[in-house]
Image (spheres, helix red, strand yellow):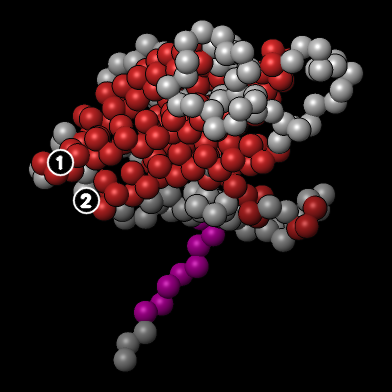
Amino acid sequence: MAYVSIESDDRMEEGPEGLQFQSFLGTDARDTSGVPGGGSNAQRGYIPDRPGKSSFWNIDYYQPYFDIDTKTVLRRCYSTLIPNGSYIANHLAPADLYGPFWTLTTLIFSLFVFSSLASSIAVYLSDPDAASPTDPLEYDFGLLSTAVGLVYAYGLGVPVLLWLGLRYLGIGEWSVVETVALWGYGQFVWIPVSLLCIIPVPVVRWVLVGLAFALSGYFLIVNTWPILATADQKAVRLIAIFLVLLHAALALCFKVLFFSYYAVKQIGPKDPIPDPEPTARAFW
């Protein structure tokens, strides 16, 4: 075994690969005076920690989907009244969950409040002398729970199930947030219609519900069809028919459950669905 003598030299020289060496012996790496907790990683000379992306179960994961201003939400709501096939590309870039949540929640509130108002109007028109303004009106909070289950099941459950089904079949390139946003904003038209349905004329109510059904249904189909049309299986396109029937069932539930309060002396033509009770239905 041979030994080679190496002379010690305090000078730092440039290495053969062009590397520049620098001495840190003049500083005390353990000096953390004035730094709480002994100093941060950056102050100690370490690589700072970089937090990863938030997990699905972390609330920070959903924060970007609620970071939207009121003006944008209102514009997205109004745009559903003029349906076109490029709503996702033109108005949901990026998609949010704040607007759909408040649209559905406002619809629940509107159905309950305006249905109660329609009931009180029907009672007054049936017997103006017996309806005293000082008598307290008892609200049927069962309708509120019905509205919550019906609106959230359709506005949130249906788009999630549709996205999962298409995802399983390998169809479509949209995200679950875009699907929920499309369905949530698509129910905006029912809010003004629920207000107008306090008019105690059955035919007018049916016309309003029919218009809302046609407008919102066309909006959903015209934006869903391009996704369904990409499927190789022709039977997948039958989903559009199922969505139309499901939307028609929703419209019928809105009309029958929340706006079937009529005065004894009915105003206008007879309602196509007769009221089984001889007197006006009200919250007693």
Residue type at mark 2 is: Leu
Q: Residue at x 43, y 33 (%)?
A: 250
Determine the residue located farthest toward the right in the rendered image: 134
Q: Residue at x 49, y 26 (%)?
A: 274
Residue type at mark 1 is: Ala
Task: Give the x, y percent position of residue 245.
Answer: 32, 35
| Tag shown at residue 135 | none
Q: Residue at x 65, y 25 (%)?
A: 279
Q: Is residue 70 visible?
A: no
Q: Give how far apart the Cα atoms at labels 1 and 2 are.
A: 9 Å
Relative placement, left or right, of 29 versus 61 is right
| Tag shown at residue 169 | 2
The magenta segment:
4-11
Is disc 1 in contact with disc 2, using a CB cutoff of under 8 Å? Answer: yes
Element type at mark 2: loop
**Residue 26 drawn above or below residue 155:** below
Image quarter hosting the N terminus = bottom left
Q: Residue at x 78, y 57 (%)?
A: 37
**Residue 183 drawn above or below residue 12:** above
